[in-house]
Amino acid sequence: MSDIHRRRTDADIEAVLRDVTAGDLELLEPPDDVWAAIESATVEDSGATGAVVSLASRRWAPRRLALAAAAVLVLVVAGAAAVVLTRDDPADVVAAAALAYDPENFDTLGSQASASAELVVEAGSHSIVIVDAVLPSPEADADLEVWLIRPDAEGNVADLVSLGVVDPADPGSLEVPAGYDPDTYFVVDISVEPRDGDASHSGRSILRGPLLDA
């Protein structure tokens, strides 16, 4: 057989096997007289004497093999589905914060602002997603920046970390830096930050709120 013919034959076989289902593997049961004729012919050809071993107990073997093959097929498909579900497992929202404006302590730019924040866990990493946001645009030489605050026992700022600058029209998602546990840094703050080269918080918060279990 030539290599071309062999490859074509193999491809045809693979194409047929891809279309085989569990139902295709089930064999039809022939009439009883067929089995009796086979038994009779076997005894006559061999000249054997004595008890004849009935083929009735064996004729179900192909059906059992077909059912076993079908069971294996189901297990393979189920395993593949489990892998896909695990790979495509969606992110979990584990906490959320309603961000509020404090007229006594916050920048007046936040008086008409509103937003919520969600703490999302995906593949072991934490992110803060700003949702339902109505945010003001700061002055030309400033940006809106999102922070996570670790408060002290009195609720004052003990420490904080910047998550980054956001677009007021589409604040989106910001990754929590490694080493900052949201169980400890659990207050979300949005502030107005001048572009003055100072990386510290300006003190011009517009919205703030604690993360609570979702």
Image (tube, grey):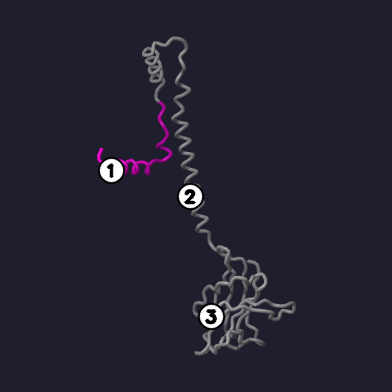
Q: Quadrant of the C terminus?
A: bottom right
Amino acid, disc 2: Ala
Seen at 61% across and 66% down, the residue is 94
Amino acid, disc 3: Val
x then y, percent, for residue 197? 55, 88
What residue would you read off at disc 2?
80
Mark 1: few/some/many CA within 10 Å (<14, 14-19, 20+)? few
Whether residue 133 is situated above or below residue 80 in the rendered picture: below
What residue would you read off at disc 1?
8
Distance Cα–Cα, label 1 vs label 2: 29 Å
Cβ–Cβ under 8 Å for marks 2 and 3: no
x then y, percent, for residue 84? 49, 54
Seen at 47% across and 17% down, the residue is 53
Distance Cα–Cα, label 3 vs label 1: 60 Å
Q: Which label number is shown at residue 100?
A: none
Helix, strand or loop for disc 2? helix
Amino acid, disc 1: Arg
What residue would you read off at disc 3?
165
The answer to if 12 sits in the magenta stretch is: yes
Whether residue 32 is situated above or below residue 4 in the rendered picture: above
Report the number of numbered marks: 3
Q: Earlier in the sequence, mark 3 or mark 1?
A: 1
The answer to if 26 sits in the magenta stretch is: yes
51 vs 136, nearest the viewer: 51
Q: Earlier in the sequence, mark 1 or mark 2?
A: 1
Q: Which region shows up in magenta?
A: 1-29
Cβ–Cβ under 8 Å for marks 3 and 1: no
Provide the major secondary structure of the magenta segment.
helix
Helix, strand or loop for disc 1? helix
